Image: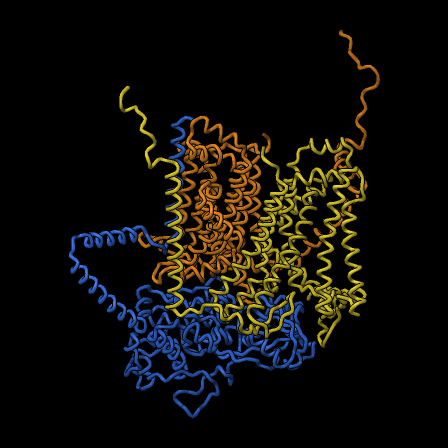
Chain colours: A orange, B yellow, C blue
Amino acid sequence: MAAEVRPVGNPPLPPPILERGVIGWMHANLFSTWFSGALTAVSCLVIGAAAIFGINWILFNADWSVIATLGGQLVIGQYNTELACPGQNCFWRPQVSVLLVTLILGMMWGLAGGGLPKRMGIAVAVILSAFALLPYSFERMGMDVRLLLGANIPALGIGWAIARYTPLGTSRNVALSAVVVFVAILLLVRGGPAIPGLEPVSVRHWGGLMLNLILAVGGIAFSFPIGIALALGRRSSLPVVKLLCVVFIEVFRGVPLITLLFMSQVLVPLAFPENFPQNSLFRAAIVITLFSSAYMAENIRGGLQALHPGQAEAARALGLPSWQTMLFISLPQAIRNVIPAIVGQFIALFKDTSLVYIIGMLDVVEISRAFIQGNPEYLASTKELFLFLGLVFWVFTYSMSYVSRRVEENLGVGRR
Amino acid sequence: MSPSLTYKGVPVWRHTQVIQWTTQFVSGILVVVLVSWFAANMINAVQDREIPHGFSFLDREYQTPIGQHFLPYESSDTFLYAFIVAATNTLIVSIAGVVLATLLGTFIGIARLSGNWIISRIALIYVEFFRNVPLLVQLFFWFYIVLALPPVREGYVLADRLYLNNAGLSIPWLSVSGLGSSLGWIGLVVVAIVAGIVVHRWLVIREIRRGSAPDPLLMGIATVFVIGAVGWLVIALSSGTAPFTVSLPSPHGAFGRISDGFTMSGGLMALMLGLVIYTASFIAEIVRAGIQSVSRGQIEAARALGLSNARTLRQVTLPQAMRVIVPPLISQFLNLTKNSSLAGAIGFSDLTNVAKTMTQTAPAVSIFLMIMAAYLAMSLTYSLIGNLYNKRISIERR
Amino acid sequence: MDPKMLKNKVYFVVAVLLALAVTLAACGGGGLSEEDVEERAQTLAAERMTDDTAMTEADVEEKAQMLAQTMVAQQMQDDQMETVGNRLQAVMDRGRVICASRNDVPGYGSLDDAGNNVGFDIDLCRALAAAVLGDPNAIEIRLITAAERGPTIQSGEVDMLVRTVTWTTSRDAQWGNYAQTMFYDGQGFMVRKDLGVSSAMELQEASVCVTLGTTTELNLQDFSNQNNLNLTVVTFEDTDALVAAYDSQQCDAFTNDLSQLAALRTALSNPDDHVILPDTISEEPLGPVVPHGDDQWFDIVKTVMGILIYAEAYGVTADNVPTEATGDTKVDRLFGLGGSFGQDSLGLDETVAQDVIGAVGNYGEIYDRNLGPDGIDLPRENGRNALWANARCTDCPKGGQIYAAPLR
């Protein structure tokens, strides 16, 4: 029998109670000094009081019936009314669009095999499907609507399978199908006289959250390349190009978006010949995009400025022409460095889409406000309505900033 | 050597300078053509459709009320003056908002890096909540909070000096007693501030040369105060009245509305709360990123040299962090100024909203050109100050 | 970098940009389509070809003269078109009547539970669509803010402005033509009962809530100046915030058109605690406005409004629209069953009144539906908005002011 090796002396003592377990964590993080302890105590009291008051108000004092009355209008605005879509039910079109989006999310999940895309896809599909169980009567929310909502989970699965088992599952194909889906959604929602079953719905009747999302996605997609072009123009050595870009950026950054939108309605029509075909939503979308691209340009310019000149010099030394150096060496690094600022701008753009009320479009905020003002019996519920709208926006914007933070971590920004 | 390999020089159309000049020329011409086409169309439209235009309305009486205003205003004043009153409203909101938002944002940004878990969490929640909800929604939130205060006749009163109710916060304020003496004293204060800066500079230089001197900052501020106070006394004794007298707020009339003193209207309170808290959430992130960008070695070195914590922050961390902080900070200042145009929704008359009312009785085209010019002037001033400051603090690239 | 990979990347970037361009075209909708551009380019090219063929100087001169003549003729034609039938034809080609209106005022223009535009102003637009196109649903409602009313109607991009617009001389001169007063409103005040105020004259140094960008603001200032009231004003862009501010006593009084005060009183937490003061400080005749420059269209709108009013005077409702001669000459003339009131010269159908009344009902029905018992419940009996008289019995005056030019 081998001799048991015993430690000499007493067994090591556990760390002092103040440095281990929950108490240790609390000591280190909450009560390390008396000042810190006092702050903790005061904060806890304030948070507790606010929570009690808030929960009490949300559950017992608030009247949420206005949200229930608005229902589908919050999502699609006037899209399915008699004026927009005479003699038929058009609600399925935005719903199918949503299915296409879940399909893409499913493909992204299949491509990545897990992680963030998986969590996002599942969360979106489950939440959307859960809307099928809303306690509306079947007259208000038909079986077709519920089924299409419930179909989001299968759509996610199909997307996943496509990415897994078909040649579509490469990142380029997924990116291309995302672009295709965006175009398809626009066609589906807009309709066209030549397509049977898809009667055209004037963009004037697009509304609700759908409008905010379409404007935001379109605005992001276009403001990004325009912003890059402007940033390059501003850094250009050509005086005329540089001057034009600087003037453009400063004018669009210097004037409130509200004023620009108002001008797009009042002045811009005068700047075209009388019979020039015009579309006020299109004008507004252009203004929002240009406004955003001016900010985008400044963000990207910051990223380019922070780039070490050695990178470009090395590329030159390897014989890349200057446009390739810019496109494949400088820009990717510059953009990677300013992802937080760019995503911040995307978030701002999404929030700014609610300003289209100036051109009489009924986005999710405006249709709610118009409804309560036109039906004074609901005016007392303004607080509840705004709280709800705040939550809706928060869900989208917070997910955007969450995704951006994860992407940033994956790219290892700031760790090199 | 085959003749095809002889070097013939770069063809003209691939010459860098040719390409560059052609690009510039073409883009310049395109823009000029486009702009003149728009201008021509606009002039045609204005003439053909008899759309009112021009600026002759500027000397007409405005005859419309403006809610809260910082400059004295009567309805018999002209459009031009009313426009200046409205622009001043926006300017004051912007300056006050910028100062308060910077203070609050810096505080939250530092709290984000706090060692106390709860404090850093609260700061994080603050940032993630307030920057992700549209400002309009937040303005309404604060508007309802202000409305929850008691109405004017049941409001809080502190020693007959301070009135707080849902119509606003009224505090004692200086009122001009005589134009000459008031302006004279303001001029003197400007001189005093310049003198204070000179004293501060001089003491800093002395401190560097001799190693010790009275605290430059303290002495500078003291100089301003001493000159200001002496000037006040001289003016008061020579003209018989003080340059400014104190005006106390008090309830007037059958409805108990507070007048005199300075009243910050309910709408303005909600606007300031909303703007400052919203913008501070962005500034907090900028400040945090700035502080984190300063390498730890710098702070450790400062400690090793025996600098106190406060001095480390003031003379080592902040000056370096400022380089990262200033450019995006200026952007936020511009945003705050522009966002104040949402004030109309909650009952404060800012430039945009007064101008919208003006379009009822004056040409919309002219009014909108004026608003654009006014906002651009404000934005460019901020940008200019920011760029100058940025140039001063940036390191030379070696 | 591997040149092949590089090339692939370039293709990818180009593909994405192309897709974006397609989207742009799809979004455009109303913009120039590709075919349009191509067509235009071909026409231009064809013109070029003819221009390029050799010509003598004389030819050129001759051609220039011809061109000038054509242009003058064209100009004259255009000038004529300006006043006759331009807009009617445009509306018929388009298949829709575009009305600028609003969606945030109970009774006049608001949204119902399903998101449809409803209200008095919307019904007037539907009546016009029924008259011109035979379909009351062939309308497009362009929602505009108060500040946009002037520029919108001036630019002529809408066919009619019905957005609780007060008829004033300067607007008539600058904005467009006022067709017909369809509602007489006036500006008044609402205050809390416990303030003990019985007249607007007693509002000395009071604080008043008002909406921004309307005549309401101007009238309030005039009233305050005339009576030395020294009012404090709080202006709001929209009524949701304004009602909340008044309800929590941020201001002592709330001024607006009387019809709006009545409708918004029901939204207050305790409607019975508030009283609408008897004073009316302004005259607010409301009605549709048409763009300047097309007399025929102006007349059409006036006539359609007249049809609504006279149908009520003759007791014809949506349910009893005559389709065969009734023997009553006035009714038969109105409904195109005998005689005419000028439909032809306006470019309207003989039976236009049948379409209009069958689709939206007469003035009284529209009133009851939106402003009366089924809407915001404004009393009409013996008020200014009653008919001037019973048209068939001119000696039975009803004491109101709703009157239109006789249809004959």
Residue at 27% over, 21% down: B2
Of B337 and C35, the residue lying toward us: B337
Left or right of C212 on screen, residue B280: right
Left or right of A44 on screen, residue B279: left
Q: Quadrant of the N terminus of chain C?
A: top left
**Residue B337: which quarter of the image?**
bottom right
Left or right of A322 on screen, residue C220: right
Of B248 and A162, the residue lying toward us: B248
Measured as percent of width and height from the top left, residue B300 is found at: 72, 31
Q: How many tags in the picture?
A: 0
Q: Quadrant of the C terminus of chain C?
A: bottom left
Of A132 and A197, the residue lying toward us: A197
Q: Residue furthest top?
A: A1
Of C303 and A283, the residue lying toward us: A283
**Residue C311: which quarter of the image?**
bottom left
Visible in this render: residue A379?
no
Measured as percent of width and height from the top left, residue A111 is found at: 47, 33
Measured as percent of width and height from the top left, residue A200 is found at: 36, 55
Q: Residue furthest right?
A: A9
Q: Residue furthest bottom?
A: C395
Visible in this render: residue C406?
yes
Q: Is residue B306 above or below residue C251?
A: above
Measured as percent of width and height from the top left, residue A119 is found at: 54, 38
